Amino acid sequence: MKRHIALLASLLLLTCTAAIAQDYVPTPVTVSSEKVKLNGKVYYAHLVLERQTIFSIAKAYGVTEQDLYEANPNLREAGLQKGSILLIPVSKQDGTAEEPDEVRNEAASSQQVEYKEHTVRWYEDIDDIARRYDVSVQEIMDFNHLKTRKLTTRQVLRIPLRKNGVPVTTPVVPAQGTDVEQNGTDSREAVPETDLNSGEQADENPHFISHPKDVVDFSLLLPLKVGNTATEANMDFYSGVLMALKDLEAEGLKVNMHVYDLYAGMPDVDALCKSDFVLGPVASRDVEVMLQMIDGRVPLISPLDQRAASLATNYRRFIQAPAGAENQYEDLAQWVQEDFNNGDKILFVSEKNASNSQAAVNIRSAMARRELHYQIMNYAISDGRALPDSLARCLVRSGVNRVVVASENEAFVGDVVRNLGIMLGRGFDIVMYAPSKVRNFDSIDGTALHDVSSHISTAYHVNYGSPEVDGFVRAYRALFRTEPSQFAFQGYDTARYFVRNVARHGSAWTHKLGLERSHGLHTDFLFEADDNDGCHNIAIRRIVYQPDYTTILLK
């Protein structure tokens, strides 16, 4: 049964909810008729009015927020100022922006052969992609005019389609008013068009066209029994969601959130299925129950429990928001490969009699896929004093020893860190790569992680040095009179990300999640689709414990 917020939270939360419910009337954005040309590029000159937002301006002009930041270098730091002039890049559909001749020629040549676009993932190389689509590496390189085999993450490749070993071709029909070469082919690639009045944007897949929504409606499922200390994390998550809604409405978005307390029993399924999406529950066992009940009628997002990732195999329209452990292991292996230099040594350390643990198996598999050459060292804590000498014989003095710790056993990892510290004292250059759980091991001295230059791949990390995080912490303190926990950050990031995607893409939102990586305060989002019309997050953050006892976020 649906519970109102007034029955679930303190007076403080009631105050926040009431504030969120107030009407917010943003200033409409009118597309400027003034254009300027700078450095060969054409821009609209937009006069910023009070209560206009970066989101609303970008939406009105049919550009992305990133486009605005790139055209206005001081915007991110100074923010949007009333009365200032904002440069808005003129989109291609206005017919002003010209494509370079080489781009037009490339489009003309590749239009003759049908192709599929593939976005390169962080763990793929060109050989992986060629095998996947049953084409040769050389075909991919020629079709995309690649000079080297090196690819970058999020690079979009055109993969030529083949049928019975023969390339699939289609005739090119020139559009009215376009330049046509003598052989009858269009000399320019068709540009997707945007109707600013209707809000409809053409997409590479005609079945999933974006139709922005004026009001986003979602359901939040949490166990929120007041007075139960076990629900403190859930209340923090809920508070983070409220903060997200407050900021979203300040951007001009309208949001209806329906809160259900799972302690009061299961909510009405028909009511849930009227939502744009369901956020929660938080525990994997409760997530599975809800997936069975809604039976794919509405997307369900698992916001916290990484173990819920396995449910994607059996249930439709399931979205796993936190990146799973396997993705972290994949990133760890990729990181080692990226850092490796000639003369370095990779040492794979695992616990004796526990080499078949999930961490050990998955990390070794990820390293094998990258054809990394490494030495294996299995030992038990009981091996005692002889271990440092054995470890020293496995290391090199001429390069960096990149030690991969394939264990999530606190006592064992602590012993590895201690022994690596001894190796540092003997003059070896050490860098340790380890799973994210290592950060939460209380028995390991934090300075020791810095001493061995720990490299951690993790789904979560808050960079307290960033202005965005500082602003959130200050606002959270002022509103709730306490410090935000990691659950509050996750509630904020998750609600904000999914609400904005629904507002931007409407019913097609689930098919747009993998287009670009989105950076939150606590976690990043980059989704990969599965076979059940769902998707899972593959975005991983990398943090480094530096010898000067600072911690930096690399990505």
Image: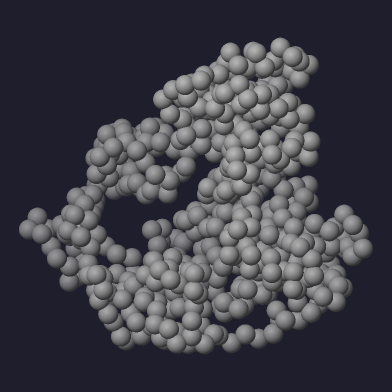
Quarter assignment of residue 180: bottom left
Vertical side of 554 occupied by 400: above or below? above
Q: Nearer the viewer, residue 274 or 149?
A: 149
Q: Residue at x 37, y 36 (%)?
A: 126
The location of residue 198, given as percent across then percent down, is 43, 78
Q: Residue furthest left?
A: 182
Q: Identify which residue is drawn at 62% across, 85% down.
A: 24
The reply to whether residue 206 is visible in this rendering is yes
From the viewer's side, name the closer residue of 538 and 257.
538
> Compared with residue 474, is residue 551 higher up or lower down, i.e. above or below?
above
Say left or right for 347 vs 516: right
In the image, 196: left or right of 546? Answer: left
Q: Position of residue 186 (x, y in %)?
A: 17, 60
In-front residue for pair 110/270? 110
What colour scheme does the image use? one colour
Quarter of the view holding residue 249 = bottom right
- In this rendering, does residue 218 appear at all? no
In this rendering, is residue 210 above or below 419?
below
Q: Image quadrant of residue 161? A: top left
The count of marks equals: 0
What residue do we see at 20% from left, 60% from top? Answer: 100
**93 sits left or right of 154 in the view:** left
> Looking at the picture, does residue 395 appear above or below residue 145?
above
399 and 527: which is toward the camera: 399
- In the rendered image, residue 173, in percent from the top left (x then y), is placed at 20, 60
